[in-house]
Amino acid sequence: MRRAYIAGLVAVGAIVATAGAGGSPPRTKVTVWSAPGPAAAAYGGLNYGGYAPTTGALVTERRDVELTAGGEVQIVGVAATVDAASVQLRDFTDPATTIIEQRFMPGASTPTEILRRHVGAQITVVTAKGELTGVLRSVDEQVLVLELGTGDQRRLQVMRRDGYIQDVRLPPGSGVDKPTLVWRLASKKPGKHDVEVTYRADGMTWTADYLAVLDEAGTAVDFSAWATVKNTTGASFDNAELTLVNGGASGPSSVNPYGVATRSGPPPAPTRYTIAQPVHLGAAQSVQVELLPTRQATKARSVVTYEAMPDPSLGFQAYPNTDCNQFNGVGMGNGRAEVAIELDVPTKDALPDGRVRMFRRKTDRLEVVSEEQLRSSAGLARIRVAPHTEITGERRAVSCNYDERAHTVTEKLEVKVENKSKRAAEIVIREFAWRWPVWKLDGEDAKSARGGNQTLEYRANVPAGGKKTVTYSLVYTW
């Protein structure tokens, strides 16, 4: 037996617990992890040992239940996608309650499945000749077997279901046609109990979308951030206290796909967004909620971003890349510069990945400017406008050293950018600490900011026809 009282359930940095005694706690709490973004498959993703992203939802429901004489308790209408091994029950009425047995009964969706749930129960069958009440003994797609009478008068009545049976009345209060959790408890307090059930369920995700509207002058922007929550768990959650989590992982595999044991690093830290008002999460529905309050007439700054290469870090999360020759050639052949606008946002972390649709106001109408993936760092949102063909660059490794005994890779990198245009430009050079999530900067010669867990950004004002070189050193440890 195990204790029904569970102090809390911890999942990837997110703790769902009941509210304190100073007020009535919410009846339902739902924590949803974001869906993996389109970049999750880049460079092999999990195929090359990446972290398994946490998915689905953590559901906590407060229910009033009736403890029967046999010690059985049912909670009807839970998610059909519940992970039965994650279920925890907490009894507030009797904390000393112990659980003898716990079962999950999937929902029934066809008439035959529903009737089979009531084998052994008393039902009423309506036919053209009248009503018959008895115990259901068997049922299939063609016939239904009812036990009638008692003692010497007991008999079995076999009835065809194709037209002869007009209606079937089930016992009142039976909800076993819906996904149901059933417990057999040992408690000294029969009757009504105030309980809390917590479980993880698949089939609920959220994604971020952004909207930016430039004014006519192109100097100010209205910026809004939305989350779309999709619920395909098969259950509805009314007035739910909703928390959205971006990032976090269930941890890396200890053996990579090549059968080599690896050392584990910490998973990316999750970011949590608590929605201010209760939300109705209807079954098979989507709902949109604000991630951030809309920013009105925020000053927009024009910048140029330069990336020498796409970010390969997703492919190296569960084991470090120790090949000092990979991605360290001169030129790279795929560097790109882009004209972008950026604005300040009130966040301590980078905003979640998502599409941003940008419009520009023209007198009484809006014109489409772009639809791109948002680039974000702590306190900043950046939106691509167009390619910049007159800023070029190259990237190379000045030195790289892999120390197998010390479990470190130390490398010094150099990025050169050149402004071939006739105007000065503020350039944001984006680089990636892609080899491994545990790293530090060592003796950099320019002020840097981490755009994300494994992103570095250097700002440089480059005059027309001028050049700028950024050199930085990284030490990876595992």
Image (tube, helix red, strand yellow):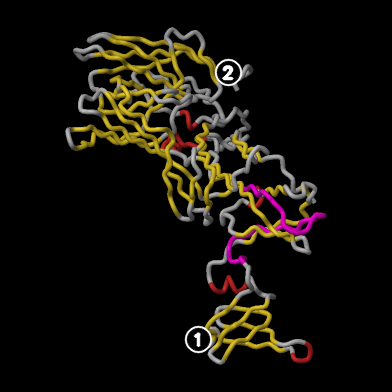
Which is more N-terminal, label 1 or label 2?
1
The part of the chain drawn in magenta is: 175-199
Q: Is residue 434 visible?
A: no
Q: Residue 123: within the magenta? A: no
Q: Which quadrant of the structure image shows residue 220?
A: top left
Frontmost residue, 77 versus 257: 77
Indicate the quadrant containing the C terminus: top left, top right, bottom left or bottom right: top right
| Mark 1: amino acid | Gly
Say left or right for 286 vs 220.
Answer: right
Q: Residue furthest right?
A: 188
Secondary element at image label 2: strand
- Residue 408, label in figure: 2
Q: Residue at x 48, y 20 (%)?
A: 324
Task: Describe the element under mark 1 as helix, strand or loop.
Answer: loop
185 inside magenta stretch: yes
Q: Residue furthest left?
A: 363
Q: Residues within 10 Å of mark 1 (few under 14, many from 20)?
A: few
Total numbered labels placed on residues in the image: 2
Front-lying residue, 466 or 195: 195
Residue 301 location (% of width, % of height):
30, 20
Residue 281 higher or lower than 117, as above or below:
above
Q: Name the amino acid, label 2.
A: Thr
Question: Which residue in the rendered view is the most extreme toward the front?
Answer: 23
Q: Residues within 10 Å of mark 2 (few under 14, many from 20)?
A: some
Pinpoint residue 457: horizontal percent, then vertical percent. Answer: 41, 18
Q: Is residue 19 above or below residue 204?
A: above
**Residue 344 occupies quadrant:** top left
Q: Which residue is mark 1?
A: 163
**Viewer-side label of 2, 1:** 1
Q: Position of residue 118 (x, y in %)?
A: 64, 73
